[in-house]
Image: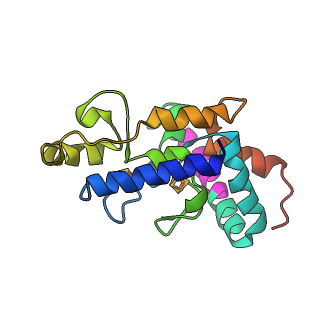
């Protein structure tokens, strides 16, 4: 199984979820999870196409590099803010540096974590089984009686295939970016 095949499955799952529940996918124009929790779990095999794009797209590189510098400055300030008591808290609500003008700049290469969010299922039933944000779960509470329990693709089924492609545990997208900016010598 190749990464592109797994992504194709995820995209089909999203299309099928949209077909089953046309009112229920992310609210149009919303980018809140990318703005507030923008360091999705990412596998090394997923990082490679993203890295390749950074190295061949100077405009993307410049945007992400500037966003990364801004993030580091923000973290420094937050670590000195007495109202933000822990390192985890300082890092938690982090905008994704690949988000620009409300759009994902690596949409076709975005990690499976992002692809599966909002349209796949966790074990269980009801709204708790829908892998999505709390905002969407609240909306599902209203709409679930109309749609019943939708037959969403299991999130774990997609991730188990991705894990089989990787020899090491995943990192956050920001951890890969940190390594990249520390060690790579991009031509951009
Ligand atoms: S998952 Fe929720 S927060 Fe994220 S884009 Fe969709 S509606 Fe917005
Ligand atoms: S990679 Fe794209 S979809 Fe994923 S968090 Fe970043 S901006 Fe959002």
Judge whether residue 165 can be spotted in this image.
Answer: yes
121 vs 101: above or below: above
* Percent of width and height locating residue 72: 64, 49
Chain part drawn in magenta: 68-80
- 126 lies above or below 188: above
Q: Observer-nearest residue: 124 or 96?
A: 124
Tell which residue pokes out farthest to the bottom in this image.
59
Q: Which of 181 and 7 is in front in this view?
A: 7
Q: Does the magenta stretch include residue 137?
A: no
Residue 175, by quadrant, is: top right
**Total number of numbered discs in the rendering:** 0
The quadrant of the image that shows the N terminus is top right
Instruction: Assign the magenta stretch its main secondary structure.
Output: helix
Q: In this view, does 146 lie to the left or right of 49?
A: left
- At which x and y percent is residue 59? 69, 72
Residue 14 in picture, x, y percent from top left: 41, 52
- Which residue is at a point 83% across and 60% down the rendered structure image? 186
Residue 8: image x %, image y %? 54, 53
Q: Quadrant of residue 173?
A: top right
Rendered-image quadrant of the C terminus: bottom right
Question: In the shown orientation, is residue 98 left or right of residue 25?
Answer: right
The residue at 64%/47% (across/down) is 3
- Report whether 185 appears left or right of 70: right
């Amino acid at each position: 199984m190749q990464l592109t095949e797994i992504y194709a499955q995820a995209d089909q799952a999203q299309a099928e979820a949209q077909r089953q529940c046309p009112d229920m996918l992310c609210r149009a124009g919303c980018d809140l999870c990318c703005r507030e929790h923008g360091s999705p779990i990412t596998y090394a095999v997923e990082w490679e196409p993203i890295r390749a794009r950074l190295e061949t797209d100077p405009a993307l590189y410049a945007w992400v590099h500037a966003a990364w510098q801004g993030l580091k400055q923000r973290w420094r300030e937050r670590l000195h803010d007495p109202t933000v008591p822990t390192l985890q808290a300082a890092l938690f609500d982090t905008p994704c540096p690949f988000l620009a003008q409300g759009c994902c700049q690596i949409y076709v290469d975005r990690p499976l974590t992002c692809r599966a969010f909002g349209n796949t299922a966790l074990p269980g039933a009801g709204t708790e089984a829908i892998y999505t944000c709390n905002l969407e779960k609240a909306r599902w509470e209203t709409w679930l009686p109309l749609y019943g329990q939708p037959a969403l693709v299991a999130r774990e089924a997609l991730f188990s295939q991705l894990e089989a492609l990787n020899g090491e545990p995943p990192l956050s997208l920001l951890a890969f970016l940190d390594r990249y900016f520390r060690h790579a010598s991009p031509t951009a």
